Image (cartoon, helix red, strand yellow):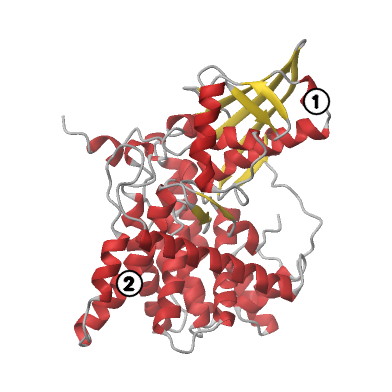
Amino acid sequence: MAISVFDLFKVGIGPSSSHTVGPMRAAATFAQALADQQLLGQTRRVEVRLYGSLSATGVGHATDRACVMGLMGEWPDRIDPTSINARIQQLRESGQLLLAGQQTIAFNWHTDLLLLDESLPYHPNAMSLHAYGDSGLLSEHTYYSVGGGFIIEAAEAASGIAPTSDVQLPYDFSSAAELLALCNKHGLRVSQLMMANERAWRSDEDIRSGLLHIWSVMRECVEQGLRDEGILPGGLDVPRRAAKLHRSLLEIGKPNVITSTLSAMEWVNLFALAVNEENAAGGRMVTAPTNGAAGIIPAVLHYYMKFNADASDDDVVNFFLAAAAVGILCKKNASISGAEVGCQGEVGSACAMAAAGLADILGATPEQLENAAEIGLEHNLGLTCDPVGGLVQVPCIERNAIAAVKAINATQMALRGDGKHFISLDRVIRTMRDTGADMHDKYKETSRGGLAVSWVEC
């Protein structure tokens, strides 16, 4: 499957790419299909069934709300996040849903939206949608939200074969070894090779403008996170910290050597906290490659742009391209879904991607870049996904800040070497896949193990 940089970096909303963005896309796809098949006028009722992890943490991840908004014809990259609460409240009070934005049908939140204590084959994030008319079932589709906002239908999942694409890439690769071989054979940096592949979909101008738009959404997310204060929604009473930390950093006087270094790391923490607090509040986000890990890549890029006087838009473009190369490898050969392999697939992949992006714009060779990504991912192996209360707050928010600093350190270590190292990135990715397969389900985004249960005082 050919994967674009824009598949990994997508504009959406919080708090989760797999539990919010993916289900909204699936529901919107289902509603649009009803419209395309001219079934809207016959539809009297729609039923949503959530399974596995989508059911276990669906309320905390706003999966239920995302499905409803998708049925109303909304898409995660276009919806106004600030409008959702009022529209959900209106629907609950009226019992009326505007299907695909066109056809009004009755909708009962408790009987038409079911969180089932069972799983479907192929992936933990499963959902099925059913449309009924006067004479019975009109249409039924099952979708799997496989991480990063990606969705596949049941037939694709059952085949075990990734969806094919007619796009032919000039430098297709499925392993880091192949990527390095192509770079060396053609004398290309990783970002240059990725740019050549992206041209299979769009022009240089569209690639550049699209990536700069992604960067602008990330910057807006940080700025919003630096302004907003108060308590995050969900019932845990987690306070937002980014605004207060920002004021504290602005008050720091002329730094000495020690405080300068510590201050730089605090800015990295700040950027990550700002993004992930916005994500937890359901704000406008960019999957990077997921929402649960959305603060790492923008934090590292913000760090570079803030502390490098020569930073430019070219650096932004190359950062995203190089980061995406590693994200493609993680998605192809393991997973970026916390429900499938634990948080190592989200935070671990994002840490490796951020390290690769930073390495590229700091002049790393392809071998040094691969080493940086390997270090970033290796030291997140085994990381469980155990969100307290099913919310993307504890430990998710702080985890992003820690991983962002870790990505910078990984890059620094790799740049001090020549790219030669003991364990390859390919082996680490395979280890992540195997570790995820061995990991108990209670540690994979179900909130039934780990911190999600140990935080309760008994």
Nearer to the camera, 407 or 249: 249
Q: Secondary structure at mark 1?
A: loop
Residue type highlighted by circle 2: Trp
Residue type highlighted by circle 1: Leu
Above or below, comparing residue 320 to residue 451 in the picture = below
Q: Is residue 379 visible?
A: no
User: Which image quadrant is residue 456 in?
Assistant: top left
List x then y, in percent, for residue 363. 51, 85
Q: Secondary structure at mark 2?
A: helix
Residue corresponding to mark 1: 39
List x then y, in percent, for residue 216. 55, 68
In this image, 188 relative to 58: left or right?
right
Identity of the residue furthest to the left in this view? 458
- Mark seen at residue 358: none
| Badge 1 density bin: few <14, some 14–19, many ≥20, Cα 10 Å | some
Above or below, comparing residue 288 to residue 206 in the picture = above
